[in-house]
Amino acid sequence: MLSVTSLGVSYGGFRALADVALEVGEGEFVTIVGPNGAGKTTLLKTISGTVPAETGGIAYRGRDLGPLRPSDRAALGIAHVPEGRRVFPSLTVMENLELGSFRRAARAGRARALDEVLGLFPILRERHRQLAGSLSGGEQQMLALGRGLMAQPDLLLLDEPSQGLGPRIVEQIFETIDRIRRERRLTILLVEQRVVEALELCDRGYVLETGHVVLAGPREALLADARVQRAYLGA
């Protein structure tokens, strides 16, 4: 479904990504883990089009994404849930969710998608008239995830959904992501610092360090890898 080849991205002379390659198959759950500053967020932004690629290419279902604007990529079925939640604080919960279904292909199924999202996150139903900026961090993350699902995407890009949240809320968020994947058979590309939780959810994973892919493989192989255990699992 998604193919990234020899991708390079620079910011003002700083090389954020160098020769990055990865594949995400239809229906797969793929995780990218690594330390702060590794380039994980930059990678997702480049896929969704908010950061331009300097070298290499990105193809989605065989189509070159290079010439396409972010809105065009979203119209193809790619939804990006950014780090830091990025909800619209002065709009209500319901208005935020409705904005998620701007994609033409999602408009006809808006009512059904809304029902599904509110079923996944009952607290959003209770808070539907509340301003998004007044929600707790965990509730805002649920709202951001729900807004992404309102686009009825084929590929969901998730950037650090656990960021700044307490352990109980993180567990709830990861359980919901797993449920979404199982029930919807949705293709997911997850960027996450919580290595154990992220790798336990996925089919395959990549380890990104200083802009380079240093390891890649199935979940079990990465969890058993001595380098991953030393660097990320405290072994």
Image (cartoon, helix red, strand yellow):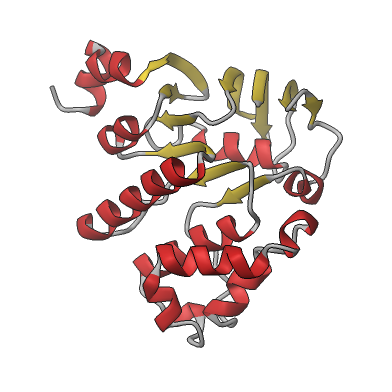
> Residue shown at 59%/81% (left/top)?
91
| Residue at the farthest left position | 235
On screen, 54 above or below 40?
A: above
On screen, 229 above or below 171?
A: above
The image position of residue 134, as x and y in percent, is: 43, 82
**Camera-side residue: 115 or 61?**
115
> Residue shown at 30%/39% (left/top)?
194
- What is the quadrant of residue 137 in the picture? bottom left
- 31 left or right of 3 in image: left
**Camera-side residue: 171 or 162?**
171
- What is the quadrant of residue 11 in the picture? top right
- 70 left or right of 137 in image: right
The image position of residue 205, as x and y in percent, is: 42, 23
On screen, 64 above or below 87?
A: above
In the picture, the quarter occupied by the C terminus is top left
**Camera-side residue: 126 or 37?**
126
| Residue at the farthest bottom position | 129
On screen, 68 above or below 83?
A: above
- 31 left or right of 222 in image: right
The image position of residue 49, as x and y in percent, is: 72, 42
